[in-house]
Amino acid sequence: MKYRHLLGFLLAGAVALSGSLVVATAAPAPPPASTPPLVILDFKPGFDDMMTMLIQPRHIKLWLAGQQRNWTLAAFQLNELRSSLVRIGQTIPKYQAFNVEATTGSIFQPKMQAVAGAIARQDIAAFNTAYGQLTGACNDCHAGMNHEFLVVKVPDATAAALYPNQDFRPVAGAAPAGGRR
């Protein structure tokens, strides 16, 4: 009998101890001291990188959407193009001696307004003309920044092959760009 109380006491103590061990082991362990700090952005894209990543694809997609008369997608791509130019100017405010945001704004804003007008009217002839003028503005900007060797052109029929996983044709009943259904 004497041992029964001792055994019960030991068993209760073991249960309590194992419960506290479960709680103690359930908490996450702190990271080892040798773990390097998290670096959000080691890659710092240059002006050329940003133009290639943000502007060139949107320029092409704008053309492809317009050629398919997908005015919703064209308006979206034009807005993305416009926003990308602003973000580049905010990220790289000065390139050589140029204020990027002011320079790109003055060169491209009137051309983008003409493209937007053609999209709003769903006028393919006006779109093609305005898009050609927008493309010419790209080359004017390059020449002004002493990069006249960078020549942008209106995409040709093979441009669609650059985005084989995207259909540029309009979707029936699609909401206007930026709008809701």
Image (cartoon, rainbow, N blue to C red):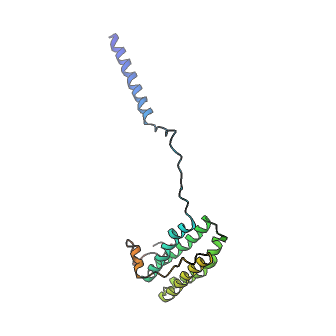
Give the residue drawn at x 43%, y 75%.
Answer: 174
Which residue in the rendered view is the most extreme toward the bottom? 125
Confirm whether residue 25 shows in the render.
yes
Front residue of 59/49: it is: 49
Q: Please give left or right for residue 58 compared with residue 157 in the image.
A: right
Instruction: Where is residue 51? Give x, y as percent.
Output: 54, 70
Front residue of 64/120: it is: 64
- The quarter of the rendered structure image containing the C terminus is bottom left
Q: Quadrant of residue 143?
A: bottom right
Question: Residue 155, relative to residue 25: is it above or below?
Answer: below
- The quarter of the rendered structure image containing the N terminus is top left
Instruction: Where is residue 100? Give x, y as percent.
Output: 63, 71
Which residue in the rendered view is the most extreme toward the top? 2
Give the residue drawn at x 47%, y 80%.
Answer: 63
Confirm whether residue 116 shows in the render.
no
Instruction: Where is residue 30? Give x, y as percent.
Output: 49, 38
Q: Quadrant of residue 69?
A: bottom left
Front residue of 82/180: it is: 82
Q: Quadrant of residue 142?
A: bottom right
Give the residue drawn at x 51%, y 79%.
Answer: 152
Q: Please give left or right for residue 4 compared with residue 28 in the image.
A: left
Give the residue drawn at x 56%, y 80%.
Answer: 139
- How many dots with numbers? 0
Instruction: Where is residue 177? Give x, y as percent.
Output: 49, 74
